[in-house]
Image: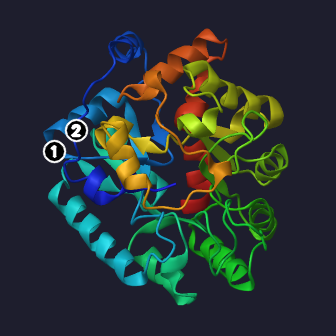
Amino acid sequence: MSTSRRSFVQGVAAAAVVTGLDSRSAAAAREAADGQDPGEIWIDALAGVRFGDEGFAEIARSGIAMLETTLGPAGNPTFSYEAAVRDLATWHGVFNQYRDRVVHVRRTDDIIQAKRDGKFAVMLGFQNGTHLNRDLRNVDFFYNLGIRQIQLTYNELNALGAGSTERSDVGLSDFGVDVVHRMNELGMLVDLSHCGVKTTLDAIEVSRKPVVFSHTNCRALNDNMRCKTDEQIRKLAAKGGVMGITTVNFFVSNKPRSTLDDYIAHIEHVVKLVGIDHVGIGTDSSIAGWRSNFPTEKTFWDFHNQFKFKPGADVRWPPFIEELDVPEKFHVIRRRLLQKGFSTGDVGKILGGNFLRIYREILG
């Protein structure tokens, strides 16, 4: 799936204004926007953000303290080294422009200090390994420029391994093994969200540290090639990893419109399968919501028709869940989890504590 919604142009620099917000969503958001424990650090493990007055207002409404965001158009299977460097330069300019309000995350203490200072923390990553140009030295190069997370593959085959929509999953390559080991040594998060089943299992096995699925869903609840099997989830948890659950309508269920409870069911499934310590939130949307980038069905398809999606990916309109397509989505999720009987401590783990723990272990 494309990451236009997570790209700098549509995420950071004045994307389209949210329009046509359903009154039910607005009402649910207002009702849910309360009760956040000030000591909690809410983390979206994969999202987009925009700044400026409107963007900072959305951040304040969201309650989110930190997110990881993607550089470059991940849907482009030839995303290059040169494009990656350009995007990084742009982001460094953003951090400089908003240095009094935004923090570039390099270590876990950056997140904690940002929360204390009332600033917003952003971790930078890639959703494809093509920009490494088959050169292991580039892992160090991008680490030194502030990248802290790399998804090994997008949907297609690359030099590291196979993506989830590739017709034949060949598993992790020798170069992929070397990249994982070097990321382990440097302190970078190995993300396997879009990787094929064999590539995912190979990477979990060879990694010397926990890995993440920053944004995916459970195949036991929705037989979609982008969702993870119970075997993959168990292996992730056995390695100490964390899985972020996306709010993407067509990954959550095969219904025309998924609901909030369909979404919560994925969290419940992971908890029942491997325990409370291995699940978090990776919305795979912008803080403002999908309609901030795609206000109409036409704008959605105008962009997504550039890419070749296989039937198993089941891309369809709308991409959002109505109740969660608002900046206050974490408040909405929190309220529903409490209604379902989760303790406040466990809800805190889901909304950020589990990812903060793994960031401490990997980033230092």
Q: Badge 1 local density, few (<14 within 10 Å), some, or many (20+)?
A: few
The amino acid type of the residue labelled 2 equals Phe
Comparing 35 with 180, the one in front is: 180
Compare residues 199 and 53 and report the one nearer the observer: 199
Residue drawn where x is 18% and y is 50% of the image: 100
Tell me if residue 65 comes above or below residue 145 in the rendering.
Answer: above
Q: Give how far across and how far down residue 194 sits, in percent.
A: 62, 58
Quadrant for residue 152, please give it. bottom right
Quadrant assignment for the C terminus: bottom right
Q: Is residue 172 left or right of residue 129?
A: right
**Residue 173: image tag:** none
Q: Residue furthest right?
A: 231
**Depth check, front residue: 157 or 354:** 157
Describe residue 312's horizontal placement relative to residue 281 as left or right: right
Which amino acid type is shown beneath numbered disc 1? Gly
Residue 159 occupies quadrant: bottom right
Q: Tell whether 141 sits left or right of 244.
A: left
Q: Which mark is residue 52?
A: 1
Asked if residue 147 lies left or right of residue 23, the reply is right
